[in-house]
Image: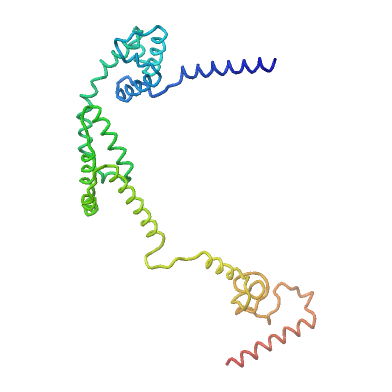
């Protein structure tokens, strides 16, 4: 029983914590004091209220209860700027609050239309490094134009894109015109594919100079193996065993002179007679080889 009671307390505590977080968290961005984001904010408000069965706030002649009025009013106040809360602090009805905000900021269509038109005229495909960057900028302008009542068709978007290619890509633009795209999405798909193919070509071109052969890693390993003096055979310097490269040990290379003996052997401990005789034999053998070579 004690365990069940503790579990119920935890569930109740979790429920109230979740309710409190919903009251303080923002569903979308607040309305700025200047009304610069009013278009997006108004659309977010309509979507949220309709999705949560609170569309009565958007209908002026629909009666609502006190609880519905309080919930909608709290939601709207939470998503407006603090200065706007102070300005409209005396308005207690959500419908009245929306009406005041519409009267104040709904003139954005007249303000944004010339700005969006200028941005559309200045938009060029050649000014962007990536196709997706151009596509995002274009649709941002189109959304503003559509909000202001201007319709932008697929033909307008295709013409805007192909007519603003760089002069070096004029042949490519003419090729796309001959293909006769009707939907902008089809042209966008082809542009993205062409961009990816160009990236692959540039990567392959920069991997090594033109006309050169690829250098395999296996060759590099085998070369370093012999340079470190671990091979078999006669080398050109002192190596480990009979090998190439620089290392400790004895070799039969070009710079090896057995007649000189060891440099670090002390005079107090001379070599035994057998070793001296062996070295003399090697020196005589070398002189004999030299006579034969001449």
Q: Assign the N terminus to one quadrant of the image.
A: top right
Q: Assign the C terminus to one quadrant of the image.
A: bottom right
Q: Residue at x 34, y 21 (%)?
A: 46
44 is higher (above) or lower (below) than 122: above
What percent of the width, then of the height, locates residue 287? 65, 89
What percent of the width, then of the height, locates residue 118? 20, 34
214 is higher (above) or lower (below) than 271: above
What percent of the width, then of the height, locates residue 198? 34, 54
Tell which of 53 and 84 is nearer to you.
53
Name the colour scheme.
rainbow
Residue 116 in which image quadrant: top left
Residue 5 in which image quadrant: top right
Q: Is residue 275 left or right of residue 39?
A: right
Instruction: Report how many numbered discs are placed on residues in the image.
Output: 0
102 is higher (above) or lower (below) than 91: below
122 is higher (above) or lower (below) than 220: above
Residue 273 in which image quadrant: bottom right
Q: Residue at x 24, y 23 (%)?
A: 108
Q: Residue at x 50, y 17 (%)?
A: 19
Q: Is residue 269 left or right of residue 82?
A: right
Q: Residue at x 39, y 56 (%)?
A: 203
Q: Is residue 10 left or right of residue 55?
A: right
What percent of the width, then of the height, locates residue 255? 61, 78
């Amino acid at each position: 029983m004690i365990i069940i009671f503790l579990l119920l307390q935890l569930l109740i505590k979790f429920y109230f914590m979740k309710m409190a977080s919903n009251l303080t968290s923002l569903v979308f961005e607040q309305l700025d004091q200047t009304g610069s984001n009013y278009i997006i904010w108004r659309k977010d408000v309509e979507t949220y209220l309709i999705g949560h069965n609170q569309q009565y706030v958007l209908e002026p002649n629909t009666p609502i209860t006190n609880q519905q009025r309080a919930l909608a009013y709290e939601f709207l106040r939470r998503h407006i700027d603090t200065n706007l809360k102070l300005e409209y602090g005396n308005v207690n009805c959500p419908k009245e609050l929306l009406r005041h905000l519409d009267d104040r900021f709904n003139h954005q269509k007249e303000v944004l239309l010339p700005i969006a038109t200028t941005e559309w005229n200045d938009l060029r495909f050649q000014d962007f490094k990536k196709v997706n960057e151009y596509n995002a900028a274009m649709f941002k302008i189109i959304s503003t134009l559509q909000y202001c009542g201007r319709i932008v068709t697929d033909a307008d978007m295709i013409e805007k894109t192909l007519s603003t290619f760089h002069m070096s890509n004029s042949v490519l633009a003419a090729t796309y015109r001959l293909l006769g795209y009707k939907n902008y999405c089809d042209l966008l798909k082809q542009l993205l594919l062409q961009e990816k193919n160009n990236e692959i070509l540039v990567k392959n071109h920069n991997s090594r100079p033109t006309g050169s052969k690829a250098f395999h890693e296996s060759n590099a390993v085998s070369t370093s193996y012999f340079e470190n003096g671990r091979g078999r055979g006669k080398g050109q310097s002192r190596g480990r065993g009979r090998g190439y490269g620089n290392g400790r040990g004895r070799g039969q290379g070009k710079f090896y002179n057995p007649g000189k003996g060891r440099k670090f052997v002390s005079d107090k401990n001379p070599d035994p007679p057998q070793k001296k005789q062996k070295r003399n034999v090697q020196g005589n053998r070398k002189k004999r080889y030299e006579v034969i070579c001449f």
